[in-house]
Amino acid sequence: MNITVYLGANEGNDPTLREAVAELGTWIGSSGNRLIYGGSKCGLMGVLAENVIKAGGEAIGVEPQFFIDEELQYDELTELIVTKDMPERKAKMIELGDAFIAFPGGTGTLEEISEIMAMVSLGHLDAPCILYNLDGYYDSLKAFMNKMIEKGLSTVERQKGITFASTLDEIREILS
Ligand code: AMP
């Protein structure tokens, strides 16, 4: 399975993030799945790719040209797909993914996973959409999603394919 992971281009200030992303990468790399991600060597993105490769797996980066110009790409990737801009990159990452995970990240991660949530909700994408709610990172998003339902602006049915998982074991369970 191709697993597209969106996550922070920064490392954050909580060592748990690094540990958990390394664990996620090791699992993807050792389980016969393939990582699709943004292609950079920086922050949590780099730690993820490094651990997939270290575990003997394949990591495919999808990086827009302007990040390559800044030499942000991770050089040891199985494959680096260069796109002309961000919209092309996002489309490619969706096209390649069989499942989508948002690890904790910033606005970039939120933007990317929001597109997946909207597509799943509209029935335009039939794939697991998982928010990795490590230490409650996405609790406020979860509450917001419930608020949408409460106010009649979304439905349980529309949010059916979107799940919040607190642990890697839960993610493995969802994808099994
Ligand atoms: P953020 O969550 O704001 O750190 O942004 C990370 C997400 O946005 C990743 O999933 C990337 O696809 C994209 N992104 C933002 N900044 C970078 C970067 N320096 N290199 C590669 N991708 C980035």
Image (cartoon, grey):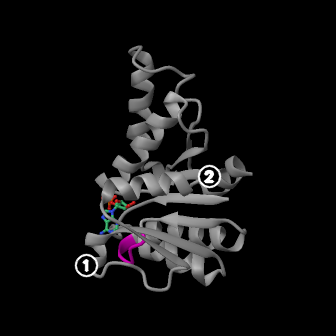
Mark toward the viewer: 1 or 2: 1
Separation of marks 1 and 2 at Cα, in angstroms = 29 Å
The residue sitting at 53% across, 25% down in the picture is 158
Q: Please check the rendered image and state whether residue 97 is part of the magenta-colored stretch, yes or no.
A: no
Give the amino acid at mark 2: Asp
Ligand 1, seen in the image, is in the quarter at: bottom left
Which of pointers 1 and 2 lies earlier in the amino acid sequence? 1
Q: Is residue 134 visible?
A: no
Task: Give the residue pinned by disc 2.
Answer: 98
9, above or below 157, in the image: below
Q: Position of residue 65 (x, y in %)?
A: 30, 71
Q: Which residues are magenta?
A: 39-43
Examine the image and state in which quarter residue 146 appears.
Answer: top left
The x and y percentages for residue 75 are 44, 85
Quadrant for the N terminus in the image = bottom right
Report x, y in % for residue 128.
Answer: 60, 44
Q: Please give the name of the residue rendered at 71% of the width and 50% of the height, measured from the top-left corner.
A: 173
Decide whether the magenta segment is chiefly helix, strand or loop.
loop
Tell which residue pokes out farthest to the top in this image: 152
Q: What residue lies at 52% left-to-right and 76% top-to-bottom?
A: 79
Badge 1 amino acid: Asp
Q: Is residue 28 visible?
A: yes
Q: Position of residue 17 (x, y in %)?
A: 45, 66
Q: Which residue is mark 1?
A: 69
Residue at image coords 55%, 47%: 130
